[in-house]
Amino acid sequence: MSTKLLLPLCLAATTLTACSLEPAYVRPTAPVTTEWPAASSAPQSGEQPHTADIGWRSMFRSSKLQRIIEASLANNRDLRIATLNIEVARNTWRIQRSDLLPSMNASGSFTRQELPKNMSGSGNTEITSVYTAGIGTTAYELDLFGRVRSLSNRAINQYFATEEGRKAAQTILVAEVANAYLTWLADVELLRLTESTLTTRQDGYDLIKRSFDLGAKSRLDVAQSAMLVESSRANRAHYQRQVGQDKNALTLLVGKEIDPMLLEPQLLADVEMLDTLPVGIPSVVLLDRPDIRQAEYALKAENANIGAARASFFPSIGLTGSAGFASASLSDLFVAGSSGVWSFAPQVTLPIFQGGRLRSNLKLAETNRDIAVARYEKAIQTAFREVADALVARATYTEQWQAQRALVKESEQARSITKARYDRGIDNHFALLDAQRSLFEAQQNEILLHQQTLANLINLYKALGGGWQ
């Protein structure tokens, strides 16, 4: 075969892909209801933006938090691994896709051989030289039943799934960094409150102790005051530990040491965040979440693998061919005419007896597809539950935090009144200590509820598909 015949053969081989045995892909029905279970989450009227279209910079407006999130996106190792996995999947797909085209290889060889007298045609010892050069394809499979194409489709869907996995990883990272930052700020506030309370209680104890030394107070008053002081000391040690651990957790998420200027604490009340998110209907959420799209691409990949398993039951045709030149002298190697050589070796393989291998392989592919369906449905159910939980919490956290703020005000007033009554000898020392204890607990709970309210808003943002732009 000449090179003029080899080229048309290769072109014809690339076009002989007649059919595909992949099952038609049908998106599974979402196994959730069509409405959120919270009255406050009714679909909004008019055109509403998707939460996925709200970038994290629009969601988190505090400059310090924005810079911390930027640093985490550049340095977090989990996100870096997810990004590199995209390159792995992309090159895996390219390798698989290359099987759709013949691979062309150039080759050349030189053989020098001595023939003894009894083997040469002339009766004399002969030394022969053979030079060859050519171009050809080896082991190219004609994809008549779509096996190779199905494997390529599987690889590209796995690649798309990996891309969505990276987006999902970024969504999680952004939310984790924001929550870690808010947790750190809350514990810093709690530490400051505890230190201020310890100072106040220590001053009160010193006053009670001096009065006791003068015989004006009882030993019980001293013990009760000392109990509050030591309680504050224990709380201070607890929050000092929490602040240090919160900083370590935030540093791990960022992936490098954080600029000390960004760790100058601010009040939770000064953290600017978008507090209104478009909820819409469940179907919108299912389109916006990267992890659900990742699960669907994984399902499509397993669906394509069924096509490859089915095609294995049919004959496979492999082509091997080459064309080139051979000559006894190097100078005549590329001279046209008698030096031309070619070879063509098609091979047909028909499976007859495989001991159940092919049928089991098909059953395995179908089972993996069923597993992918279940995972896709579970991803939808998980997303629905996360959004529903966040919506229910949003309605209750706001009311609870407002009530807690009112409780702090009333506790402050009760403490002031009790202090005045104590100074006038109307109330005993125990009543004053109880009022101080109640105020401290109310102030603690207010800080924690504020942090939890903001964290719930972050979780709702993540659950609705935001955070990966």
Image: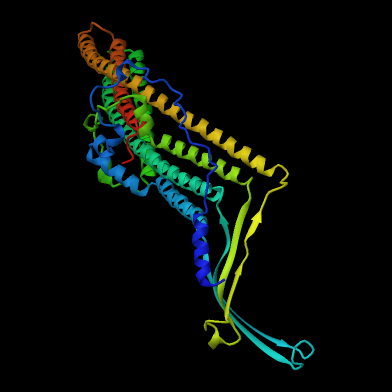
> Is residue 250 something that shows in the picture?
yes
User: Which residue ends up furthest to the right in the rendered image?
Assistant: 118
Q: Residue drawn at (60%, 42%), measured in percent from left and top?
A: 310
Q: Give x and y (percent) for residue 287.
A: 37, 33
Q: Residue drawn at (26%, 7%), measured in percent from left and top?
A: 427
Q: Nearer the viewer, residue 13 or 152?
A: 13
Q: In this figure, which colouring scheme has been used for the structure?
A: rainbow
Q: Give x and y (percent) for residue 88.
A: 47, 52
> Is residue 209 something that shows in the picture?
no
Classify residue 457 as left or right of residue 33.
Answer: left
User: Which residue ends up furthest to the bottom in the rendered image?
Assistant: 124
Q: Quadrant of the C terminus?
A: top left
Q: Is residue 389 above or below residue 271?
A: above
Q: Give x and y (percent) for residue 192.
A: 28, 30
Q: Give x and y (percent) for residue 57.
A: 25, 39
Q: Is residue 137 above or below residue 124?
A: above
Quadrant position of residue 138: bottom right
Q: Residue drawn at (75%, 89%), measured in percent from left and top?
A: 121
Q: Nearer the viewer, residue 393 or 284?
A: 284
User: Which residue ends up furthest to the top in the rendered image?
Assistant: 426
Marker count (numbered)? 0
Quadrant position of residue 406: top left
Q: Nearer the viewer, residue 429 or 310?
A: 310
Classify residue 31 as left or right of residue 58.
Answer: right
Quadrant position of residue 276: top left
Q: Nearer the viewer, residue 242 or 114?
A: 114
Q: Quadrant of the N terminus?
A: bottom right
